[in-house]
Image (tube, rainbow, N blue to C red):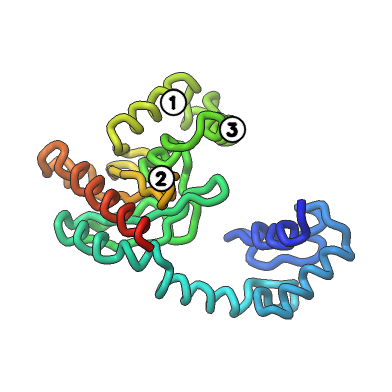
């Protein structure tokens, strides 16, 4: 593992329950020596990525600067804003753009509609990989060995909330998603909430992420069958074409 990758692993330690880290945290969770932990904290602090607090280190102002740059100028976001706005205007549902990165699917753009309720994941937070249309439509386009590895890490079929997630039916469901080009979920992340998602691809036709419509299940059923699927797949196809031109 190269030194840059080891350095960046420090950011993985920041969580809602752990907003501040110190040398002991790095040594315990990453297995680094105290000398290495001190050096990484100093380098990240000098660059503005971390800031010193009495109890340790928190994320620094440089992170906010980069977040602003991404929000304003990231090609994926720039290409998708008008598509997301139209989806919301046409349906009143929430529209999401999510990106695949490092075995996680993360919402990078959320546009709320008039349909109040939980959106299915905050911006910047990884989404449940196995219980969301947003994620499963991405998994469906990964290589079989990638899918199996992710399943082995995240699936726990013996737990009550994950019963029915046996490997064979799960893998078959992903094949069906890939064949139809979209994924529908109902009451998986939140009771009474439904979603439909379609994949987004990069210029080499590798899956990049997904576009999703989310809302109350009653509102979903108010539309003609297939209408929402056509809307989201059409928007995702247009976004894929725009990305290829970047």
Q: In what element is the residue under mark 3?
A: helix
Question: At which x and y percent is residue 124?
Answer: 48, 60
Tell me which numbered mark, 2 or 1, is placed earlier along the sequence. Answer: 1
Residue at the image point whose x is 69% and y is 78% from the top: 47
Q: In what element is the residue under mark 2?
A: loop
Residue 37 quadrant: bottom right
The label shown at residue 149 is 3
**Is residue 243 left or right of 167 when viewed as pictured?**
left
Instruction: Tell me, yes or no, if residue 82 can be seen here.
Output: yes
Work out which quarter of the rendered image holds the C terminus and state it: bottom left
Cα–Cα span, label 2 and label 3: 22 Å
Can you say whether 120 is above or below 124 in the image? above
Residue lying furthest top: 168
Q: In what element is the residue under mark 1?
A: helix
Cα–Cα span, label 2 and label 1: 24 Å
Residue holding disc 2: 205
| Residue 46 or residue 80, whichever sits in front | 80
The label shown at residue 170 is 1
């Amino acid at each position: 593992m190269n030194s840059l990758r080891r350095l960046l692993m420090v950011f993985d330690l920041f969580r809602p329950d752990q907003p501040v880290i110190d040398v002991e945290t790095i040594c315990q969770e990453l297995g680094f020596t105290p000398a290495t932990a001190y050096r990484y904290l100093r380098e990240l602090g000098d660059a503005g990525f971390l800031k010193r607090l009495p109890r340790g280190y928190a994320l620094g102002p440089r992170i906010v600067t980069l977040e602003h740059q991404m929000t304003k100028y990231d090609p994926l976001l720039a290409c998708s804003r008008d598509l997301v706005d139209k989806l919301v205007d046409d349906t009143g549902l929430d529209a999401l753009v999510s990106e695949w990165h490092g075995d996680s699917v993360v919402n990078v753009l959320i546009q709320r509609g008039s349909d109040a309720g939980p959106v299915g994941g905050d911006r910047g937070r990884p989404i449940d990989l196995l219980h969301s249309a947003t994620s499963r439509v991405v998994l469906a386009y990964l290589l079989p060995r990638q899918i199996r590895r992710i399943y082995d890490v995240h699936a726990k079929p013996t737990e009550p909330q994950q019963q029915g997630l046996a490997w064979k039916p799960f893998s078959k469901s992903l094949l069906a998603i890939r064949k139809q080009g979209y994924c529908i979920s109902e009451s998986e992340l939140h009771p009474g909430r439904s979603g439909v998602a379609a994949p987004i691809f990069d210029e080499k036709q590798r899956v990049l992420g997904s576009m999703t419509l989310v809302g109350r299940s009653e509102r979903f059923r108010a539309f003609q069958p297939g209408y929402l699927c056509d809307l989201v797949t059409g928007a995702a196809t247009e976004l894929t074409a725009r990305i290829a031109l970047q």
